[in-house]
Structure formats: structure tokens, C-alpha cells
Image (cartoon, rainbow, N blue to C red):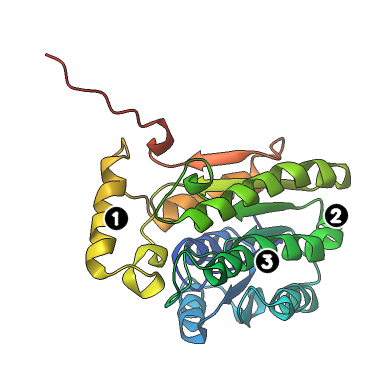
């Protein structure tokens, strides 16, 4: 018997990385899942992984589309309700650090990042609230330690995650009277596509330097896996019944890193 038997979970950005690992784990725990992504090919890969784990078609819904468009958010909610009849958990995972091929310091990049990382979670939360109120469900937003500390290389990304964190705090007060919990997961370095050259404005060499730097400022000395983040969210969605408005930092100690000189 799984922790999520009979529950219905939406995971945006589940065509790879943290979102994919979360959709798979939650489905293995008994949930029916709505998976979402930009790439239909990557979504099919997630769907095939779910089926390889023994998850039947009746417990899988698929929505392809760009999350910054309102119609995609509306389709995610409507598809879920049409197929499964309810919503128990909304995981706002879709996010990015930069728009490919655009000047990172441009207003175009700023607007795009905020549309994806902030506007879409807000919109989906508003669309899902009436359904979550009926099930006394909960929301998890995937934020970042970048929301807790300055990141000069990706300032708009860091700003968007800080905004997402305060959205969580503010909405916890709005949603608590409705019986809905909302919390944020703030990962440190995670082995996902967001930090590779295909998904960012960085070259292969810059990605390697970025990863080396992250490892050097992480006391545990490594990146986490998407599966580790999925397990953390499983706890947040199920066992953390008295937690709301909380930022759960899972960063290998990065935010505690305080270099000191070695003394004899």
C-alpha cells in the first residue's frame, strides 16, 4: 500500500529531471499523475518510464505545452479533473534559468523568466484552489537556494525564485483557512538539464566550470540527484501535515557554507 493510493497529483515540467523523478515516485506510491512538458518526445519518455513501472494508462494524463501560456495552465487543470475527477497535490516544478539565444541581461529574458517561474505557479495555484479545497490537498513549488542568496551570473533567475518563496509565504495565509497547505522546496545543485548547455546560455566549458564551482561551495561536495529531491517532496506532500508556508532547503549544506583559512 502506497502513501498516495487514490490520490491525484499534477507535476509540471515532468518531462525530465526533478519533475520526471517526482512523477515516477509519486505514481509508484499509488497516485494518478498528470505529467507536463514542452517537448512531446521527452514527455513520451516519461510516460514510457511510468508504464515500465507498471503504471496503467488509466493513471496517467499527459499535457504538452509551454507553461507560460495561460491556455496550457488551464489545460493542465481541466485535463486532470476530466480524467481523474479531483486534484490532491499540485507540484509547480517547471522552471528555467535563462531564455536560450537571448541576452541574459535583457528585459526580454527578465520577462520570460518571470512568466515561467512566477506567473505560471501563481496561475496554476489559482486555478487549482477550488479543487484542492475539496480534497484538503497541498501545493509544492520547486524553488532554489538561488532565492536565498545573490547569484550575479543569473540575477533574474534568483529574483524569480525569491518571488516564488514569498508567494509561498503569502499564500500560506490565504490557503490555510481553506485547509490547503503550500510549501517550497529549495534545492541546491541538482543533476538536471537546467544546467547543461542545451538548456541555458552557457557553453559546455561554462557548464563544467559552473558545476565545479557548485561542488566547491557545497559541504557535501556533490550535486544531488532528482530522485533525492523527489523523496523530499514525497515527505512534504504526505507526512508534513502541519507544515505550511515553509521553505524546505535541501542543498547539501550550501547555504551554510562559510569558508575559513586552514590553521595549523
What residue do we see at 79% from left, 73% from top? 81
Disc nearer the start of the sequence (3/1):
3
Disc nearer the start of the sequence (2/1):
2
Secondary structure beneath disc 1? helix
Q: Say which quadrant the N terminus sits in.
A: bottom right
Q: Which residue, given by chain and number where applicable, does mark 1 sit on?
A: 210
Which of 255 and 130 lies nearest the eye of the viewer? 255
Q: Which residue, given by chain and number where applicable, does mark 2 sit on?
A: 133
Q: Is residue 76 left or right of residue 156?
A: right
**Residue farthest to the left?**
264
**Residue farthest to the front?**
106
What's the CA distance linking mark 3 and mark 1?
A: 27 Å
Label 2 CA crowd tier, 10 Å (few <14, some 14–19, many 20+): some
Q: Is residue 168 above or below residue 153?
A: above
What residue do we see at 39% from left, 69% from top? 200
Secondary structure beneath disc 2? helix
**Residue 227: x percent and y percent?**
43, 56
Disc nearer the start of the sequence (3/2):
3
What residue do we see at 47% from left, 86% from top? 41
Q: Say which quadrant the C terminus sits in.
A: top left
Q: Are marks 3 and 2 in contact (CB under 8 Å)?
A: no
Q: Is residue 81 left or right of residue 217?
A: right
**Residue farthest to the top?**
264
Label 1 CA crowd tier, 10 Å (few <14, some 14–19, many 20+): some
Which of 81 and 191 lies nearest the eye of the viewer? 191
Quarter where residue 71 is shown? bottom right
**Residue 134: x percent and y percent?**
87, 57
Q: Which residue, given by chain and number where applicable, does mark 3 sit on?
A: 120
What's the CA distance linking mark 3 and mark 2?
A: 20 Å
Amino acid at each position: 500500500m502506497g502513501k498516495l493510493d487514490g490520490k491525484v497529483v499534477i507535476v509540471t515540467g515532468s518531462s525530465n529531471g526533478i519533475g520526471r523523478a517526482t512523477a515516477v515516485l509519486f505514481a509508484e506510491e499509488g497516485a494518478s499523475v498528470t505529467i507536463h512538458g514542452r517537448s512531446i518526445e521527452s514527455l513520451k519518455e516519461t510516460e514510457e518510464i511510468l508504464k515500465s513501472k507498471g503504471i496503467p494508462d488509466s493513471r496517467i494524463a499527459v499535457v504538452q505545452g509551454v507553461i507560460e501560456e495561460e491556455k496550457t495552465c488551464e489545460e493542465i487543470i481541466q485535463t486532470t479533473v476530466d480524467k481523474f475527477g479531483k486534484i490532491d497535490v499540485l507540484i509547480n516544478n517547471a522552471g528555467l534559468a535563462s531564455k536560450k539565444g537571448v541576452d541574459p541581461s535583457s528585459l526580454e529574458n527578465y520577462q520570460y523568466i518571470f512568466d515561467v517561474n512566477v506567473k505560471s505557479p501563481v496561475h496554476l495555484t489559482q486555478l487549482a484552489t477550488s479543487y484542492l479545497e475539496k480534497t484538503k490537498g497541498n501545493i509544492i513549488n520547486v524553488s532554489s537556494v538561488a532565492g536565498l542568496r545573490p547569484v550575479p551570473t543569473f540575477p533574474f533567475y534568483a529574483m524569480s525564485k525569491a518571488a516564488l518563496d514569498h508567494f509561498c509565504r503569502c499564500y500560506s495565509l490565504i490557503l490555510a483557512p481553506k485547509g490547503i497547505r503550500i510549501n517550497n522546496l529549495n534545492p541546491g545543485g541538482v543533476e538536471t538539464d537546467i544546467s547543461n548547455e542545451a538548456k541555458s546560455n552557457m557553453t559546455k566549458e561554462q557548464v563544467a566550470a559552473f558545476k565545479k564551482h557548485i561542488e566547491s561551495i557545497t559541504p557535501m561536495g556533490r550535486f544531488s540527484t532528482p530522485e533525492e529531491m523527489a523523496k523530499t517532496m514525497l515527505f512534504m506532500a504526505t507526512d508534513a501535515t502541519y507544515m505550511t508556508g515553509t521553505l524546505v532547503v535541501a542543498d547539501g549544506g550550501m547555504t551554510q557554507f562559510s569558508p575559513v583559512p586552514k590553521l595549523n
